[in-house]
């Protein structure tokens, strides 16, 4: 159900800080903090054309579960 899912609308890292581990640290912190709650999963959307970000989320355990308009929907189960 929706109350069991954390939805991340947008994550942005300034270009000068990209590929330096800040995004990984941020997402890992979100994942670890979520594990302390009753939330069962994290869902987010990624632009279809942004292959780099899709690969990034896959390395963090997110799986592609759907498509809508311009976006792929990714989800990671916490429990």
Image (cartoon, rainbow, N blue to C red):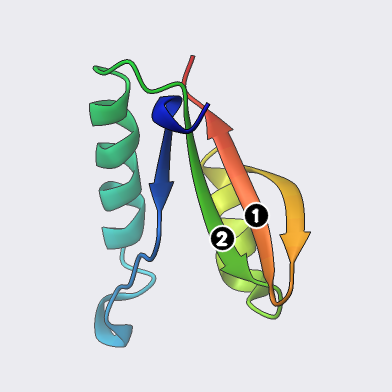
Please give the label number shown on residue 45. 2
Q: Element under label 2?
A: strand
Judged left or right of residue 71, residue 36 is left
- Viewer-nearest residue: 50 or 24: 50
Q: Element under label 1?
A: strand
Who's the residue at 53% across and 26% down the image? 1
Judged left or right of residue 5, residue 77 is right
Locate residue 77, reporting x and y percent. Answer: 54, 26
Q: Is residue 71 above or below residue 78?
A: below
Locate residue 43, reporting x and y percent. Answer: 51, 44
User: Can I make out residue 62 in this image?
Assistant: no
Tag 2–tag 1 contact (CB < 8 Å):
yes
For marks 2 and 1 on the same chain, the one whose residue lies earlier in the sequence: 2
Locate residue 51, reporting x and y percent. Answer: 67, 72
Q: Residue furthest bottom?
A: 16
Who's the residue at 71% across and 74% down the image? 48
Q: Is residue 37 above or below residue 65?
A: above
Please give the label number shown on residue 73. 1
Please give the label number shown on residue 29. none
- The residues tagged by marks 2 and 1 sit, at their Cα atoms, a distance apart of 5 Å
Locate residue 31, reporting x and y percent. Answer: 35, 34
């Amino acid at each position: 159900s929706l109350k069991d899912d954390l939805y991340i609308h947008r994550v942005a890292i300034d270009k000068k800080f990209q590929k330096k581990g800040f995004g990984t640290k941020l997402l890992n912190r979100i994942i670890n903090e979520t594990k302390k709650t009753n939330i069962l999963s994290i869902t987010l959307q990624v632009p279809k054309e942004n292959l780099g970000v899709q690969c990034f989320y896959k390395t963090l355990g997110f799986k592609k579960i759907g498509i809508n308009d311009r976006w792929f929907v990714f989800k990671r189960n916490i429990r």
